[in-house]
Amino acid sequence: MTIDYKNTINLPETTFAMRADLAKREPAMLADWEARGRYRQIQEKTAARTRAFVLHDGPPYANGVIHLGHALNKILKDTVVKSKLMAGYRSPYVPGWDCHGLPIEIAVEKKIGKVGQKVDAVTFRQKCREYANQQIDLQRTDFKRLGVLGDWDHPYRTMDSTFEADMVRALAKIYDNGHITRGFKPVHWCFDCGSALAEAEIEYADKTSPAIDVAYDVIDPAAVAAAFGVTVEAGTVVAIPIWTTTPWTLPASLAVSLGPELDYSLIEGPARAGRRVLLVVASALADGCAKRYASDADGHAVVLGHASAGRVLENQLLQHPFYDFRQVPVLLGDHVSAEDGTGAVHTAPGHGVEDFAVSQKYGLVEKYSAAELNPVGGNGVYLPGTPLVEGQFIWKANDAIVELLAERGKLLASLKIQHSYPHCWRHKTPVAFRATPQWFISMEKAGLRADALAAIKDVRWIPAWGEERITGMIAGRPDWCISRQRTWGVPITLIVDRITHLPHPRSAELFEPIAQRIAADGIDAWYALDIAELIGDEAAQYEKVADVLDVWFDSGVTHRCVLAARPELATDGPDDKVMYLEGSDQHRGWFHSSLLTATAMYRHAPYDEVLTHGFTVDEHGRKMSKSLGNGVEPQDVMKNYGADILRLWVASTDYRNEMSMSNEILKRVADAYRRIRNTARFLLGNLHGFDPAQHLVAVEDSLLLDQWAVQQAHDTQQAIRAAYERYDFPEIVQRVQNFCTNEMGALYLDITKDRLYTMPTASHGRRSAQSAMYRILEALVRWLAPILSFTAEEIWAAMPGTRDESVFFETFYEGLAATQGSPQQRQWWSDLLAIRSATSKVLEGMRVLGVIGASLEAEVTLYVDADQRERFAEVADELRFGFITSTLNLAALRDRPVYDVVAAKLGFESFVDDEAAPTTLAAKADLAEHEVWIVAKASTATKCVRCWHYRADVGSHTAHPELCGRCVDNVDGGGEQRRYF
């Protein structure tokens, strides 16, 4: 009669569920974190740590629900912060929001109307605050749901009065250091915003524009022709043609610029009303120009003479093409090239940075009025009094101006082209350069450019190409226009002379009392301020600046308003670090503005490390959009899969490039998650009843296989810690997966099942395996914590032993003693596992041939040389457990039986004893320095009902006729003894 031995088997038992059910489980865990104040607890637990790592949050804009890009960004930040906690740093995280600026202003205008029409400015600003707070609450809920731990109850908001006051103090420091200037300069202007734009607010898109060649007739044609060695008859027209895609700028054209060292030619042009026309063009472009003007001969320009340099025409006067009252000079500018066009550039200082610079050099800016320099209003309409075009919107005026030029005979060529053109990133509409009085942070006045370029070199850029990118941007950027003509923003708190607009002589000291008022009452205090309170009787001569600061200044001074203002974010120690982490577009955004303000204030960068990530695309590399229907919303992922799946996707994808996402990709990520979870569950299940305080076996006293497993965990941890230091999260995920799949699943866990299940509960062999598993799990849970935060906390709660309540209070596990790491030991294991792998292949071949079902049905003999027999002799008696076979013997290579029949069915070189009815399979192991043959045959022994091994001694024990000898010993005796496997 069969005896039930079920109660003698140690089956796994754990509360850690096989089914993750993350979408339901995570919100409960999140609620528990909130109730316990998990972030506060972490800060208390880590307060005494001697090193600080502060990841400073680049503030998202407080407008709209979060999208996948937001989730990617916040998860990466959280992963970094938690990895630093594991590495032994104090790592606080204070989230923040950017609250001022146009998007909120537009949203509020839609609800309550524009300032001055339906609502006063004070009420409008209050409604902006209320709107921003609503958006913050929406976003904060989703950010927390992602598992991001931070000081969510005390975030920084750029609209907080204390932040606004510190912005004023930052401005004061920059002013005091001599970087602030006021100027009439061209700046990018959005007509929909009604304001100047920062460089970071510009994006480029295709635009269709008229491309025209326009003749500027020379006032003294004889003199200009003479410069080319040509004599012209009376009545001959000599002109300098320009090429432009912005006809609307011609009313502001005040000069034509030539390249000082370019070679120019005088060529035949198309006749005008019966008069001969000669044109001055760059020699390299002459043929192309002649073709466009249909004045060529067999595809070539008719060249009458050459001038070796444009400088010979400097200061020659030209007639404006449609303003008869305006003559314009020839200027020389290094910005003129012979790459395209005509080699001559029409120069409108009010509508171009280079135009402004060269015109300023020649004194033209001072010669003309503001309306002549820039005849375009902030709404894109020509100002009243602008001859011929007043009241017209500039884009519509393009065609009218082209017609006007044609009527006057000055249009040499015209066509439509599509080209890249700057657009407003908010409205997606074309922008224009407009020269207006603005406030700037000068790049040159006090050496800011040089200081910023030097500061870049002291920063660790991740990826490394970020350094070159931001260096190029700083090196080539113009002065920073920091003034905006809006209502919702922090004011430029300067008091200026009503006539000269120069700042009050005591401006540097006036900033602080203004800042104190703003700290107490918000930015409305500035607008309510009577400046007589500050400057007394001088008040009649002065006025407050009405502009507000560029929002990039808001976020750009968070190093002053947040990092320097909050004690918990202090980084005073020599090993303390500050990291900025955002998308790669922020080299011209937040990284850029923060670098400039910090360098302007302190002459060093505000960060020690900068990490940038790519953007999210679909599986085909396309940008996600509603129109394509290819978007993946983080809220849907969390609802269907759970936040940890989203976190694993972020960590496993190379953030240095574009990051692909789709439902199919999510399914693959979920599969990878299950493998990791199953490994943790197996470890937990087999630690049931294990108390590390009583049962933990020293590594050096453990079985050899357990020492190997701990060594593998040690090696993996070394690689993972190094990868965390490099922020190489995909490598971490890959190493964890490989460890769980290969070292654990395919080897260690499979091998130790027999020992764990069948040996006595308290036996040394079983406790040794449990001790190894305990140590491995202690390490694994910490590897996972920065990435799979919810799952790591769930594992932590199910682990045995007395422990603190959160894995996030811990550092990387230090209990992985490396006892199998010498070169000789590593080679021993490498050879043994290679033989085991070859044996598994042979046993699989036997299954294919139908000789056996499970590997335990086989008897294996390894035929090895004398050196190998000596190397493995000590462990020979237990090798069968390592190879998961019922019998395994070592034999001399010379005694190997030879089989000549090739096992044709199998995909590797192997031999059988009989092709028709094989019972034995032989194959050679692939070892570099040793010859090893594996010969396997079906066992003829009886199966033990308890351990399932086929052993000759089954049936030889009267009390337990169905058990093998070792199972009898494990059930009724003192238990078997193992040393190795």
Image (spheres, rainbow, N blue to C red):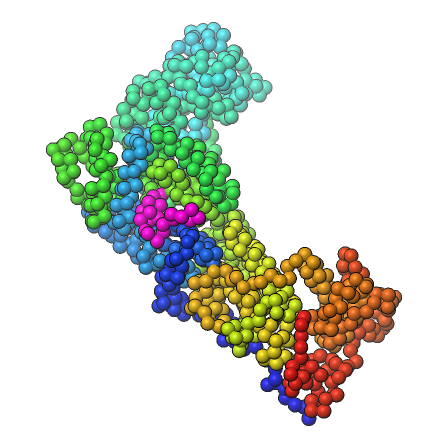
Residue 381 position in % (x across, y down)? 30, 34
Q: In terms of image quadrants, where is residue 951?
A: bottom right
Q: Is residue 160 above or below residue 410?
A: below
Q: Is residue 412 above or below residue 634?
A: above
- Left or right: residue 3 versus residue 552 is right
Residue 787 position in % (x across, y down)? 49, 60
Q: In terms of image quadrants, where is residue 884?
A: bottom right
- Residue 922 visible to an observer of this rendering: no
Q: Residue at x 29, y 20 (%)?
A: 367
Looking at the picture, tell me which residue is in the foreground, 747 or 540. Answer: 747
Q: Tell how many labels.
A: 0
- Left or right: residue 530 versus residue 871 is left
Q: Residue at x 52, y 11 (%)?
A: 305
- Residue 802 visible to an observer of this rendering: yes
Q: Residue at x 84, y 74 (%)?
A: 917
Looking at the picture, tell me which residue is in the foreground, 359 or 27. Answer: 27
The C terminus sits in image quarter: bottom right
Based on the picture, tell me whether residue 566 belongs to the magenta stretch: yes
Based on the picture, tell me whether residue 115 belongs to the magenta stretch: no
- Left or right: residue 105 versus residue 39 is left
Residue 116 position in % (x across, y down)? 20, 44
Q: Is residue 531 above or below residue 670?
A: above
- Which segment did they paint magenta? 555-579
Q: Is residue 173 above or below residue 283?
A: below
Residue 881 position in % (x across, y down)? 69, 73
